[in-house]
Image: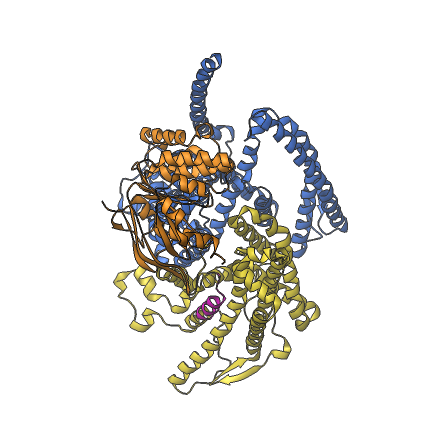
Chain colours: A blue, B orange, C yellow
Amino acid sequence: MIDAATSVPKVVVTARAQRLRFYGVWVIAAVALIVLPFIFSSGGSLTSFSLIGISIIFALSYNILLGQTGLLSFGHAVHYGFGGFLAIHVMNAVTAHEWSIPLPFIPLFGGIGGLLLALVIGWVMTKRAGTVFAMISLGIGELVASSSLILRSVFGGESGITTDRTALPHMLGWSFGPQIQIYYLIAFWLMISAIAMYALTRTPLGRICNAVRDNPERVEFIGYDPHVVRYIAYGFAGFFAGIAGGLSAINFEIANSAYLGAAQSGIVLFATFIGGTAYFFGPILGAILVTYLQLGLTDVTTVWQLYFGIIFIGIVMFAPGGIAGLLMMHRPLVRSGTLGMVIPSYLVALVPTLALACGVILAIESVARYAQGEGSGSNIDLLGVPFNAASPLTWFAAAILIIGGFFVARISWRRIAQAWDRAATVARDRGYLA
Amino acid sequence: MTAAIEINAVEKRFGNVGIIHDLNLSIAQGERHAIIGPNGAGKSTTFNLVSGHIAPTSGEIRLNGNVISGLRPFEINRHGLSRSFQVTNVFARMTVWENIRCAVLWATGHHYAFWKNVDNLPVVRRRTAEILEDIHLTHRRDVPAGLLTYAEQRELEIGITIAGGASVIMLDEPTAGMSRAETERAVALIRRLTEGRTLVIVEHDMGVVFGLADRISVLVYGRIIASGTPEEIRSDPKVREAYLGEEAY
Amino acid sequence: MLEFVPRNNAIPDTSECIVLELIVISTINGVLFGMLLFLLSSGLTVIFSMMGVLNFAHASFYMLGAFFGFQLTRWIGFWPALVLAPLLVGAIGMAVERYGLRSIHKHGHVAELLLTFGLAFAIEEIVSMIWGKSPMDYRVPALLDFPAFTVFSTNYPAYKIFMLAVSGAIFVALLITLKRTRVGLIVQAALTHPNMVAHLGHNVGRVFMLVFGVGAALAGVAGVIAGPALVTQSDMATLLGPILFVVIVFGGLGSLSGAFIASLFIGLVQTFAVALNGSLAGAFGPLDPSFGPSIITDIWNVTISQIAPILPYVLLVLILIVRPMGLMGSRET
């Protein structure tokens, strides 16, 4: 009796607390976006934030395909590109014909551009799923990207099409010349796009997309045509990718064939997958990390793309759930209070793993600089210690770090696995793990 | 009254290999019909033909008088036929609640809606809760389906099959791999859930078959060699020969 | 794309002779390109049919073959390189299967595809890191650097005949291995029923490693011999990779004969397109200038050789609309 009486209010409180926590997260995100430029006010930071914002919208749109509906696309950038080009043309038309469309509405045209392309090619593309869809997306992506070089009048050939974003009618007194105004424009579209895409996951269509991802055969036997479901998902993904492309066109005041290319498709795939496809916030993390690395690493090393590839392979092999997956894996441990059982083993593993990573970096950088012929003159600055790229000492150090680091690290990883086993058992006993 | 399912002169060949030969079967509305037969007789193929997974090489299949042979599975499902699978076929990453809810969505008219909040649909919520109660899985509603026990997954499978409100239910070996106790529970469940509906069931467990079915058809090498009430089948010499071989004199 | 380049400046006799010459040379070049594509797509098809893995890095193995061939030719000469380079690439392939794919297998086909995708990316970066991004000076070996025969007024290089001979020989060897040897029998069985083959006691893991390695080695051979004729550059894989996928989707996933037909077809189509230099403008005269710069003028003025690179993708769209399972396809993914 007493149990029943006390358990009911706990359920009610939990539901309300959950709702509060849910809306709280969005409010905090909005506040953070507004406040960010006041904390980091340098021009470089504003540019970085703008790029990260665009990246997040693009990655979230990609996850509608990959994480929600199980469609792996190697050609998603074509919608991004189409959005960018439509936005550029509309901006130029607004200026030329003196229409009264202020700049903040332009990303919507980007979305329309992405959506139109998705509607046209999506029906044929979504006829098959799985690896076949992936290959088709690669082929059609290449088709669109190559066609853009032929249709110069629309896509501007190799140099692309430029525009002047300040020439559009002003809104609220803003000309959108300064980067800070562009940042807030991007932040605004980021908020409403993210909210819209999250809301999509809570609709009947969103749930059926998940079902199609898990078991397309079964979906037919509950009354749904998987082809139609995939097609609609493809349309949405194209729409939001187009918004990202439009914002990019506004930010750089140019759209060119690189927007549509395989490299751009590859980057969004990296970002989304590294972030984690199973959780809504996964692509957000991935986009932030990948854009940040892209911006930061290009100055430090010429082979930053190789590091990307290695990180990607590492995630695929050892953490296919991405960063979000890794983080959420710890939730039952946090809830049951057993997180403390694994933290020490993490700290112990940190040293040899870091050594291994340093060895690999040294090796790669030495080879890179040697191949470029600048061996003797250049130094590799690793954690503040300068290593001469051509000196045998560096190569020796790299070899020791890699071999030694690997053997020691392997032992420490095994101990992490053991600590995890113990923590998971306790969590299971306490009822926090299924 | 039109038969629930009518199979007329259906043949199925895969390349040169004939699996189903001249299949004729009529199942009345509200009837509980079991299809039995030795392994390799073509029972699963028959199921796949009726549910639209494969199309017949020749012949015709009707559901409530409408021709369904050659239609896609989802079209047949919308005409009122639902089936379960021999190998458990649930949505492994979604919770039990969400599995049933997905099965309910089309029948409650929500189709491809992307403008409604799926948590705010009272009819959907009520129907899902009812079905969860019926299959006794309410206490497991938030568990991902892939983590259920085998028997629970089979029960969920049945739940997904009936959730859409189809008038004709086809169950493919629903009690396969279950213990005695689990089988009894499953049979009681099936009997309750298919009240007023037509049931076609493939089974190997004769106890289940003879306890549940109004009529039984025996399928051997792609042909129905006998069809009738359980007593008729039990005493039919052709059936005994098919299962036990000819008597040695 | 193998181009038709006249070797001397002799003025051809009649226009029919030019056309005939064009057709003959392009046909030989087209068949050559098709055989090259088949060397690649056959390995890809066998790997896909047996293991369910779509090896995104297959074109990268081709590129490694070309670069290893180039580097080894520099150090030890072309003929030893011809033997050694494919072996190296095959060894890399076996290592990829053993240490990469095997542990990923349980996560499903998408994970395997992503792994090979990451691998392709990393291989390209490593190649451009070591050798740079410009074309390599990978020369035809002196022994083969002479004109084999003359078609009307053009000399056809002996090296290309060599390429044809090598690909033909490998093709025949593959056919014999598959149809007549025990290993080939196992591979054929595993092509359609891998689980059954495992139940029969064959070490499927070792068979997979072997198949992956041989597939990679085949791609490597294609790279070694194609290197001197085509451009050896770090973007080889990204240029050829998508065409390879078009070939196997066009031919039908899992079908070797489909891959063969599709390879020859696409090889011929693309070679002829590059050789033909027509355009709508060339045929019907320039458009009325009042059209201005627009899509219509772009399409009017584009030459067939300009759209040659995208023709395979156009074929892809067509086959998807007309016959989605490919020419000879039967397997549903």
A260 shown above or below A105: below
Quarter of image, res A293? top right
Span colored in magenta: C254-265
In the rendered view of the protein, which quadrant contains the N terminus of chain B?
Answer: top left
C315 shown above or below B49: below
Does residue A26 show up? yes
B157 shown above or below B244: above
Quarter of image, res B238? bottom left
Q: Is A283 placed left or right of B128 in the picture?
A: right
Q: Is C255 covered by the magenta stretch?
A: yes
A432 shown above or below C100: above
Name the residue at the left extreme.
B1
Q: Is B15 covered by the magenta stretch?
A: no
Position of residue A214 measured from the top left corner of the image (x, y, whole percent): 45, 43
Does residue C237 show up? no
Position of residue C94 measured from the top left corner of the image (x, y, whole percent): 64, 58
Q: Is A320 placed left or right of B160 in the picture?
A: right
Front in this rendered view, residue C11 or C319: C319
Q: Is A226 placed left or right of B179 in the picture?
A: left
Position of residue A80 measured from the top left corner of the image (x, y, whole percent): 41, 47
Name the residue at the top extreme.
A2
Front in this rendered view, residue B155 or A214: B155
Seen at 64% across and 33% down, the residue is A421
Q: Is C176 placed left or right of C247 in the picture?
A: right
Position of residue C330 measured from the top left corner of the image (x, y, whole percent): 44, 61
Magenta span main SS? helix
